[in-house]
Structures are given as C-alpha cells and as structure tokens.
Image: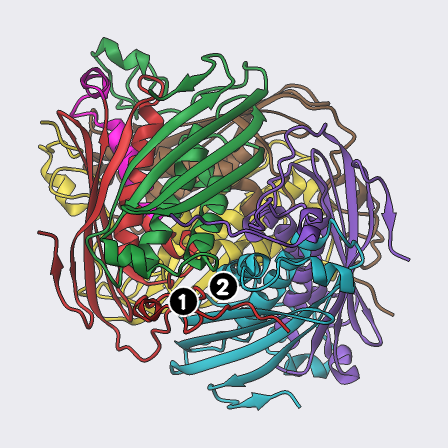
Chain colours: A brown, B yellow, C cyan, D purple, E red, F green
Amino acid sequence: MAGGRPDAGDAAVSRLSHFDECGAAVMVDVGAKAPTRRSATASGIVRMRPDVVAALPSNPKGDALQVARIAGIQAAKRTADLIPLCHPLPLTHVDVSAEVGPQGVRITSNVSTLARTGVEMEAMTAVAVAALTVYDMCKALDKGIEIGGIVLLEKRGGKSGRYARE
Amino acid sequence: MAGGRPDAGDAAVSRLSHFDECGAAVMVDVGAKAPTRRSATASGIVRMRPDVVAALPSNPKGDALQVARIAGIQAAKRTADLIPLCHPLPLTHVDVSAEVGPQGVRITSNVSTLARTGVEMEAMTAVAVAALTVYDMCKALDKGIEIGGIVLLEKRGGKSGRYARE
Amino acid sequence: MAGGRPDAGDAAVSRLSHFDECGAAVMVDVGAKAPTRRSATASGIVRMRPDVVAALPSNPKGDALQVARIAGIQAAKRTADLIPLCHPLPLTHVDVSAEVGPQGVRITSNVSTLARTGVEMEAMTAVAVAALTVYDMCKALDKGIEIGGIVLLEKRGGKSGRYARE
Amino acid sequence: MAGGRPDAGDAAVSRLSHFDECGAAVMVDVGAKAPTRRSATASGIVRMRPDVVAALPSNPKGDALQVARIAGIQAAKRTADLIPLCHPLPLTHVDVSAEVGPQGVRITSNVSTLARTGVEMEAMTAVAVAALTVYDMCKALDKGIEIGGIVLLEKRGGKSGRYARE
Amino acid sequence: MAGGRPDAGDAAVSRLSHFDECGAAVMVDVGAKAPTRRSATASGIVRMRPDVVAALPSNPKGDALQVARIAGIQAAKRTADLIPLCHPLPLTHVDVSAEVGPQGVRITSNVSTLARTGVEMEAMTAVAVAALTVYDMCKALDKGIEIGGIVLLEKRGGKSGRYARE
Amino acid sequence: MAGGRPDAGDAAVSRLSHFDECGAAVMVDVGAKAPTRRSATASGIVRMRPDVVAALPSNPKGDALQVARIAGIQAAKRTADLIPLCHPLPLTHVDVSAEVGPQGVRITSNVSTLARTGVEMEAMTAVAVAALTVYDMCKALDKGIEIGGIVLLEKRGGKSGRYARE
C-alpha cells in the first residue's frame, strides 16, 4: 500500500542533500565523514526606529545586549533540538556579539566544533534567537521592528572548505 | 557593596517595559492583567536563487515545507524556553504556512491564546525557526540564502488592542 | 506558485481534526472551547522472558520500577514538546504505576487537567516513555523484549464525554 | 543511618547492568569502552480500524506520516533527556519511515553513531514517539487505536556485536 | 505478583504530601484547589575568597551577575522539567537579583503566579541555577567556592497562607 | 557607535576565563585542548528538622531518595542547557547518591567524561537539582529546610590535574 515517501520526478531534488531519492526530507548521514575542525560566522540585524535605538540602555551598561548575547549562545547549543534534520554537535566555542548602530542592533555569531558536519546552522540559529530577544525587549516601543539580513558570513572546514560571503 | 543593576541616567529607558528603574533587563509582571483572547500573525522570507527555488521538492509533495511548518509549530511552543524574558503561555492554536514563490519561501505564522500577555514573540519565533529549517534543507545548494523581513503583521487583544502593520 | 498544502480530494480527510481542508497537518484550534476537568488513563506492557522478569530487583526495593515511574511522569509534562500538534496543558496530576507480572511489566498512567482539550496524549506518552525506561534497564539481559498494547483505557470530560475501552 | 540503596539478596540482579551491587538503578559507566560504529533498527505498529486507515491523507500527500517521521527523528535526538539512565550520544544519522498498510501504520527507525555505547534506545524511542504522533492525529476518529509490537529488529557494533531478531 | 509501591508501616509518611499510602513518591493532585495569586521569595549565597570577589567585573558593567540573573529566570520557567514531581505553572513574573558582597554573591529570587499550587520550587530553583552560573564563571580562580544557604524567605497565597522565615 | 562589551579597567578580570578583554561574559574556547579523561565529585546537604528526617520513607523503600537520584542524573545531562556558558559534553558516567543522616540528606555526585573540558559543573548541577528534589518532597513538613554546602570535592584530569578539597 502507500508509503511515507512519494516519488519525485524532479531531477534537481537529488542535489538537495536533505532529501532522499523520493523527495522525503531526511537527516544526512555523516557517519563516513572524519571529524575536522569547523567554524561558522553569521550575522543579522534588528532594524528599529532611531528613537527606539536611543532608548536602549546605553553602553557601558548594555544590559539588553547581554540578555540577547546569552540567549543566542544558549540557542546555538539547542540547534539540533530546534531544527529537525540537524545533528547534535559537541560545540567547542560559541560567541555572540550585539552592537548598537544607527539602524538598530547588529548581531554576529561565531561557532566552532570538531565534528563530522559543520556549524552553519548553529551560527544562524544563534543570530536568529539573539535577534528575537532584542525584538522582545523593544517591542513595547515599536511594533514595526524588522529582523532581517540573517546570512552566513563565512564558514571554514569540512569537505567544501572555506566559504566567504561576497 | 555593588549590585547587579547599575543606575541608568537615561529617561527613555523607562519606556522599555523590559527594563527596571536601573536599566536591568526584567520580565514584565503580568499578574495584574486579566486573561483575554489574543492572537498574533508574523511572517518572513527565505530568499534564495531561482534554481534553488526550483530544486525544492515541488507541490504536491511539499516535503521540505512540511518539515519547516512542523519546526515552526514546535518552536512557538518553546518560545519561553528560548527568549529569556518571555512568559510561558497556554497556546490554544499555532499555525505555520510555507509557500514557495519566485524569490524563495515565505513563512507565515498565526498564534492564539487566552492569557495575560500577548503572543507576538511566539509568532515571531515560529517564523524564525521555520525559516532556519528551510535554510538548513537548502544550504547545500546555496550558501548565500538570506532570511529576512521577519515582522509582526498583526496582533489582536490585550490593553493596546489591535495592531496591523501598514 | 506552489503552496505548502496540497489539495485533498478525499472527503474522509475532513473527519480527521488534525488536517485542514487541504490535507495538511494542523494543530486543532481549542480557543473556543471552555476549560473543563478532564482525565485520561492509559496502559501498556513491556513483555520479557520469565528469567528477565525474575531478575528485576524484587519488591519492596522496586528500583527499576521507580525509575520508570519517574520517567513516565516527566514525559507526561513534556508531551507538547514531543508530539508536534499537541497543546501545552497545565496538568494538575500525573500518576504512573509499574507492576511486575508473569509476562513482564505493566505500566498504567493517569493524567488530569482543567483545560480546553484532553490529556489522552499525555497519558499515552507517559506509558510509552515509562515502558522504554523499563526496556532500557532490562535490554542487557534480553534484546527480544517487546513493548506493546499501549492503549487508552478511559477518558473523562470534554465535549465527547466519557470513553471506556471495552 | 539509612542509605539510598537497599541491599539486594537476589544474585540475578548483578546480570542487569543498570543496577549496582545493592540493586539501585545506575547509569552504566562506558568510559572504558572504545568508540565504535554502531547502529540499531527498531519498528512498531499503530493498529487502527480499516476506515481510519482509509481516512489518512493518502499518498502522495502523506502529511500525517511526515509529521510522524519528523517527530520520531527529533525524539531520537532527545533520548538521553527522556530515558534517565541513557548516555548522550553524537548521532550521525537518524531515519524514520512510516508506511500505511491494511492494519495501520508501520513505523521503522534506523539510528547510527560512533560512540562508546549503542543506539538501541534511540531507535526504540524514535519508533515510540512517531507512533504516538500518528495516534494523536487519528484519535478523533478512533479511540481504540493500539500502539504495539515495538521491538529491536537489529543492532550492529559494540562488544556484543550483531543482533538480529528472528 | 509484585507492585511498584511497597507497603509503608510508618505513620509519619502520610504527612509527606508527595508520598502515597504505600510510601511511593507521587505528584500531589491539585485539581481540586482553586487558582489563587501566589508568590515566593528565596535566596542563597555563593561564598568565595575575597580576591575572587574582587576579580568579578565590577559594577556598573556587572556582566557576570547579568548572566546569572538570566540563567536563574530561565531555570524558574523550567522547574517542572527539572524537579520530577512539580506541576507546570503559568508564571506571571520571575525576578532574580545578584549582589556582590564581602563574602561573595548573594542571589535572591521572586516568583509569582495565579495557579493551583505554589511557586516555592520555582523560586528555589532560580536561586540554585543562578548560583551555579556564578560558580561556573569564577571556578577557574577558586575551586573552593561554596554554594549555600538556599532557603525560602517568604511565600504568600494558597491554603497555608503566608510564611516568612524568621 | 556603542558595543555590547564595555571596557574593563580591572586587570584582575583577565584571570577569569569566562570574561573577554572587555569584561563581557564569554564561553571559553576549548577547541585547542585535547580530549582527556576527566571526572568530578561534588556534594551538598539538605538540612531539615529531625522529625522531618524521621518522616522520610525509610530504607529499604527509599523512594524519595531514588526520585532525587534520578533527578540529579538527568540534571547532569542538561547542564549545558541550564548554565549559559557551559559546553555540551558527552558524559560517560553519572552517579548520584542520597544518604539520610541525622542532619538531613547528603547528596553526592560523580560525573565522568572524555572531553576537552571538565565536568565540575555537571557534578555541581547534579547535586543542586537532587537537593532541590528532596526539598520539594519534604517542604510540606518543613518550610525551613536549607540546601547548603554545595562544593566540589575532587576533580581529575585536564591541564590543571587533580584537585581535592581539603
């Protein structure tokens, strides 16, 4: 009778590593890869009105930014719990920074591991959750805040080697 | 001796509900509010190259999009665990949709509750995590994918009433 | 272009409350329901060889059974985190018992709440995780152990009222 | 005075690796074992009435089955959090399939790692939670659904080598 | 045959609400209680050498203390996940403060809810986890740090009314 | 403009490994360390009135102590989720004991790993959560219970070698 994985006629599907021959979403098997040193850097921005930027507790207290940093670090460690097809990885380092600029708060994360697969998702997840945390603390002042530009800036290690966003 | 909450000279700080009189980040006390029906809608987009959009398993299989929808629904339920100053809320409904368009995948979430505070963060978190899940499944094809435009589209209920993004 | 929810031609689908008009899996909206007192009882059995049953630390120490009971109680509280379309519910009581019999260990759970939807899944999840815990502690002796017969014995409350398995 | 671990007169207890010399449940110390490639396959069935089987959104949509597959994959990653005496393991692959047959939905999982202990519990947990997820989506139609036959089909690797269920 | 709950001859057991008539640990059934406003305050101290106290980043930066505060707030929300027999509660407020004094860092928490049972455990858990977080950040300088004096200072609400530690 | 990490004038800060050159709390980068065998032992005491000690279900049932032991083992596995700057570690063994004495219940934990950083925090967290669990089960009898004396008794492995508390 019927199965959980429909046929896929689309040849391009096979290029997406998270899909099997039938188009079903799968976790990539990384058991045959050797553990290597890997790192990833991602960033994003929480855009807000200038008056809301000005209302952020100013440096050197930086409290809102510290809460966001901590939330981002913790989220990196929970990536495999949040993103269904991610592997649990033994992270050796997570760093998240949050900087106030004229447009809002820029979040940058850097994550490292020695593992069989990369930490791009951990870096992206850290940025997204740190950004959501900034949003949470500022939303009473500005419901129009936008979280955007979440991208991978660089990755190192693994079979595909270094990638740097232009 | 010293305390955990530095003085804040900035008057604007007091307008940010997540900060106390000293500028320290705090959870807002919602105990005096009455529980009311509240809902929030948020959206965002995962921008990718046209050939990556084309490689997404197409409808009616829609598998990648289903994984993203499920990840978003589960993330909404974990919002208070991810965002440090959020309250745990008894969500009565979470819906996440993912639609493929020419620019990529648009994620939209809708969250409802009967509670003492709103579900804006649950809606935003659902969108962010669903978007990260789409990114995860497509990143092998395109490391330049960008998650952006995560905004609150509408909220209803609570003291501040309805908000709709222009 | 394509959407995340394919068309469903099958009329029977509409009877499954967890699917929308297009056949996509959705969380049921319980916002319009009144909170009422609800309870559910479920059970299951961990079937093992008689010599493995005999090797279980015997009463009154009952240690293996206590570990299983605790694991089941904790799992009930995590149901909404494990089962994607479940609602988070404020459980007022969870009880799990584990009894050694000639065929193995029988697990029974009882869960109560005052909420807008029932606790059948919490009761079923408690039984399943308690049974897995018994399996874990006995698997070194018998890899042929089978977890089976996980059923809802009774539920009370809610629109559909009482149900008792024949 | 009294201790947390009662005396155990039963010699057979020592054969159960999860109990110490006093019969108290303990986590097995795997520090002296070498990490090796290990895998495990488990399965189970969600038995339901033929009309409920027929109401499952049919292939190629297969939505209910996708939700169950994702829930099972995520549960495998949370095994050490659910089963008290399990070790956290760096899973290299998790696959869960769900197939509709005349009796209901058969769930099969396959889990791999390179670690100091096996992944039987991860495979069993994936099956149990995927089965619970199917139950959740069908329970409105049939409260008599039974989850059963959850067994280890095969394991490879480790000191005890290959096991295959007859 | 044997059951999971041994007989208890000890009359005093019945006074411990978390044990049933047989001495087995159980979750208290709070379904018959009315939800009322409840709060609890707890505190504890992380005792360290004066030179380690002096090395803590000083006010107004207070970063170590902010990390501890955030960890304590998040832990309060996870109490039912950590303490097996605790009920999940809809917390309306959690506040954690950390103050540096001559002996070390004093942690104080205050938790509120409107629920059927009290939040003593949430307040105690917030203090313990905030204290562990301070310990983590200082342990490189002083392995002799002691976490102590974790007590309930006050509770309000519920059948037993107000309690204040003398 | 402003940054998330204020300047630190205090030279002593650099000795605290969890703070960067600006005094911001950071996760220590352990990527350059070799994985070695490490263990840690911690203990603490739950002090209660003699009549409450007497009311604890007595040995050999020891139920309250078993619940506490299990909660401590599970907490050790969740340390990186609770303590923001901790690394996720592949624990090879966790043991928690709980012994009733004239002053109350003494908790002792022992945790092992083969990893790039130590397991002091895992041992301390296991003790704290096991102690909170004992408190939870006894608080109905004695609100004056105090959790104290949580210290590291010994650690082995790593660059700094063995430490034993005097």
Depth check: give the residue in front, B1 or E104.
E104
- What segment carries the magenta color? E49-75
Give the structural element (helix, strand or loop) at label 1.
Answer: loop
Q: Which amino acid does label 1 sit on?
A: Met
Q: Distance between the residues labelled 1 and 2?
A: 8 Å
Main SS, magenta region, reads helix
Q: Could you tell me if residue F42 is visible in this image?
A: yes
Where's residue F21, x and y in %? 32, 13
For the C terminus of chain B, the quadrant is bottom left
Residue drawn at x 31%, y 12% is: F14
Q: Which chain carries label 1?
A: E
Q: Which amino acid does label 2 sit on?
A: Ile
Magenta stretch encompasses residue E59? yes
Q: Which chain carries label 2?
A: C
Give the structural element (helix, strand or loop) at label 2.
Answer: helix
- The residue that label 2 is drawn on is C73
Q: Could you tell me if residue F83 is visible in this image?
A: no
The lab-note entry on whether marks 1 and 2 share a chain reads no
Q: Count the marks.
A: 2
